[in-house]
């Protein structure tokens, strides 16, 4: 009665197709994030939030502690 | 997955290995802008940093924090714009290069749009599911029963299929 004729012949997306789509999108997102995420800068920001220096941008914290102890 | 503990893994190593998957998790929750998703993921890592030695299950812990942060972000965006908290709308102001790159990928665009149309609980359940968590683990993380998680996952899949089929019809 109220059926839309243009629906005829269009197959429904299956659960397997959704899962395949998720797999493809997972790869797309990973590739794009690889291009934009600066992991070392992110780490540096986290350390800076707590007033510390990231080991990747300076000497390791354990070394710093040892240096401080030696200096006392 | 929830049984994976942090023992022996230092924060930096974990961050380098897991940052991307946490950003993607936030996108699975409905955040279509990668820049916003990264900010939310970064906030979760910032919270984890001082408590790192005490966090037993970091993958789940970070996802719970990121999920709460994203909900907070949606509420704030809704207040500011006087729109509802539908995330697809809340995120669209960000015109970053990553967002534009994603927009050009039709698969990604279609899936993220279909996810954004799901009710929040269904989005959450699918985000945990797609990140490899079992229904039982998701139930623990969300404070729901395993049965409720299973039902929401089935409903979400049904809605995604319907939404993607509709997109296919319109694109025909």
Image (cartoon, rainbow, N blue to C red):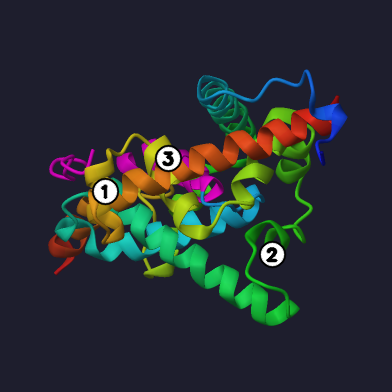
Residue A62 visible from this viewpoint: yes
Quadrant of the snapshot with the C terminus of chain A:
bottom left
- Secondary structure beneath label 3: helix
Q: Nearer the viewer, residue A4 or A16?
A: A4
Quadrant of the snapshot with the N terminus of chain A:
top right
Mark 2 or mark 1, earlier in chain = 2
Q: Dot 3 surroundings within 10 Å: few (below 14), some, or many (20 or more)?
A: some
Mark 3 or mark 1, earlier in chain = 1
For the point 76% across and 28% down, the residue is B168
List the residue tagged with mark 1: B147
Real-space Cα distance between discs 2 and 1?
31 Å
Measuring from the top left, give residue A13's x and y in whole percent. Answer: 63, 25
List the residue tagged with mark 3: B154
- Secondary structure beneath label 1: helix
For the point 50% across and 67% down, the residue is B71
Direction from residue B161 to residue B98 in the image, left or right: right
Residues in magenta?
A: B1-28
Q: Nearer the viewer, residue B130 or A10?
A: A10
Q: State whether residue B6 is above or below residue A29.
A: below
Residue B11 visible from this viewpoint: no
Q: Nearer the viewer, residue B120 or B98?
A: B120
Real-space Cα distance between discs 2 and 3?
26 Å
- Secondary structure beneath label 2: helix
Q: Is residue B5 magenta?
A: yes
Mark 2 or mark 3, earlier in chain = 2
Measuring from the top left, give residue B114's x and y in whole percent. Answer: 65, 43
Specify whether disc 2 shares its chain with disc 1: yes
Q: Dot 2 surroundings within 10 Å: few (below 14), some, or many (20 or more)?
A: many
Measuring from the top left, give residue A38's x and y in whole percent. Answer: 56, 43
List the residue tagged with mark 2: B90
């Amino acid at each position: 009665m109220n059926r839309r004729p243009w629906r005829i012949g269009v197959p429904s997306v299956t659960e397997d197709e959704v899962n395949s789509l998720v797999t493809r999108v997972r790869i797309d997102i990973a590739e794009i994030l690889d291009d934009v995420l600066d992991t070392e800068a992110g780490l540096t920001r986290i350390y800076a939030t707590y007033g510390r220096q990231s080991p990747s941008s300076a000497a390791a914290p354990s070394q710093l502690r040892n240096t401080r102890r030696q200096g006392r | 997955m929830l049984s994976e503990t942090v023992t022996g893994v230092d924060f930096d190593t974990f961050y380098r290995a897991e940052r991307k998957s946490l950003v993607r998790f936030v996108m699975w929750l409905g955040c279509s802008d990668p820049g916003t998703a990264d900010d939310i993921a970064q906030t979760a890592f910032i919270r984890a940093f001082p408590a790192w030695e005490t966090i037993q299950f970091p993958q789940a812990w970070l996802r719970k924090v990121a999920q709460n942060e994203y909900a907070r972000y949606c509420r704030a965006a809704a207040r500011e714009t006087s729109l509802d908290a539908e995330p697809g709308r809340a995120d669209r102001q960000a015109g970053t290069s990553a967002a534009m790159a994603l927009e050009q990928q039709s698969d990604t665009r279609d899936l993220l749009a279909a996810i954004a149309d799901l009710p929040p609980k269904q989005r959450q359940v699918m985000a945990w599911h797609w990140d490899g968590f079992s229904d039982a683990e998701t139930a623990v993380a969300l404070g729901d029963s395993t049965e409720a998680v299973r039902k929401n996952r089935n409903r979400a899949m049904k809605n995604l299929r319907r939404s993607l089929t509709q997109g296919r019809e319109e694109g025909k």
